Image (cartoon, rainbow, N blue to C red):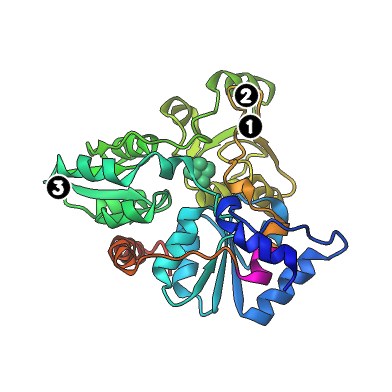
Amino acid sequence: MDINISTAKLNLEKNGFLDVDVDPTIDLFAEIERLKKEKNAILLAHYYQEPDIQDVADYIGDSLGLAQQAAKTDADIIVFAGVHFMAETAKILNPHKKVLLPDLKAGCSLADSAPAPLFKKFKEQHPDHIVVSYINCSAEIKALSDIICTSGNAEKIIESIPEDQPIIFAPDKNLGAYLNKKTGRNMLLWNGACMVHEIFSLEKITRLKMRHPKAKLIAHPECEDPILREAEFVGSTTQLLKFAVKDDAQEYIVATETGILHQMQKDAPHKTFIPAPPNNACACNDCPHMKLNTLEKLYLCMEHELPEITMNEQLRVAALKPIERMLEISRAAGLIG
Ligand code: SF4
């Protein structure tokens, strides 16, 4: 075996990925296609991945769509171009398949904002509440939950729960507050948030709107309330994409991670999509976790089938129950096929 690969495997845990140089003359797109066929692998990519990864994926989607694809695939290997909790969800749904993630350190600030031991204590303080958790959480939090939801199905999930049943919603306080408003519930909210969706500046958006008076502001419900109140449409990543394609405006200010602009531009090439500005000069509306995955890391992970997601079986079974509940409710509501 190549000495570099042996060393990279030894250092995998420390680095999070196979740290070896890739020959720059290799056609990575062709190689990834070859590996998919040879290994009967499916490549699932989130909308927030870099454009090259989106273009080589078999399926591009948001959390709900990706979980559904992971649940129904007959591929032997699932390569997940997204962040850790998403690949974990694929593993929970597919214990007998190999699930690969190009960089194990592709985490999520929102998932990290709910450490399982603290959340367990919080839950114990409210024994009459059931727990609805947003899919952006660790397997441990899923195992402590009754139902999982995504931004695409959260309203339907909450509406399926009897009105007199108290609910804890975790981990995103912005999405939770938005859902409280939409459903008229008074869910108890865990105090977590996504670093990317909290960064938008209302002041700069207002100035931008003055320069583009016809542009519609569209926003993801993980954004803070002042942004959501100004938005003309609020929805999950997939809902934002569908709205932008169907709607009759020509210009949009998009308040979510910038990766989605690639699909928006592809699906509606004649329209203009402007990323909503963050409250400082950095490119903070690029998710640094999502962007840890690169085409090179993706190729290496498919070639060597590492890094792989593994999970304790007891944890997996406990985390599976609330995900299955979500898929059942989503199916009954006609949100997925
Ligand atoms: S955009 Fe936010 S919620 Fe999504 S993966 Fe990045 S940190 Fe997590």
Q: Residue at (20%, 44%) from the top-left corner?
A: 123
Find disc 3 in the rendering and name its residue: 165
Q: Quadrant of the N terminus?
A: bottom right
Residue 313 is drawn in which quadrant? bottom left
Q: CA distance from mark 3 to mark 1?
A: 41 Å
Q: CA distance from mark 1 to mark 2?
A: 7 Å
Q: In this orientation, which residue lies closer to the viewer: 120 or 227?
A: 120
Q: Position of residue 120 (x, y in %)?
A: 23, 46
Which residue is pictured at 38% across the width and 64% down the height? 334
Q: Position of residue 36 (x, y in %)?
A: 66, 75
Q: What residue range appears in magenta? A: 300-305
Mark number, residue 209: 2
- Check the image and report above or below for 116 versus 95: above
Q: What residue would you read off at disc 1?
A: 215
Tell me the CA gap for discs 3 and 2.
Answer: 42 Å
Q: Is residue 301 shown above or below 276?
A: below
Asked whether 307 falls inside the magenta stretch, the response is no
Identity, as a three-letter code, of the amino acid under mark 2: Lys
In terms of image quadrants, where is residue 332? bottom left
Q: Along the horizontal axis of the image, is 286 left or right of 202?
A: right
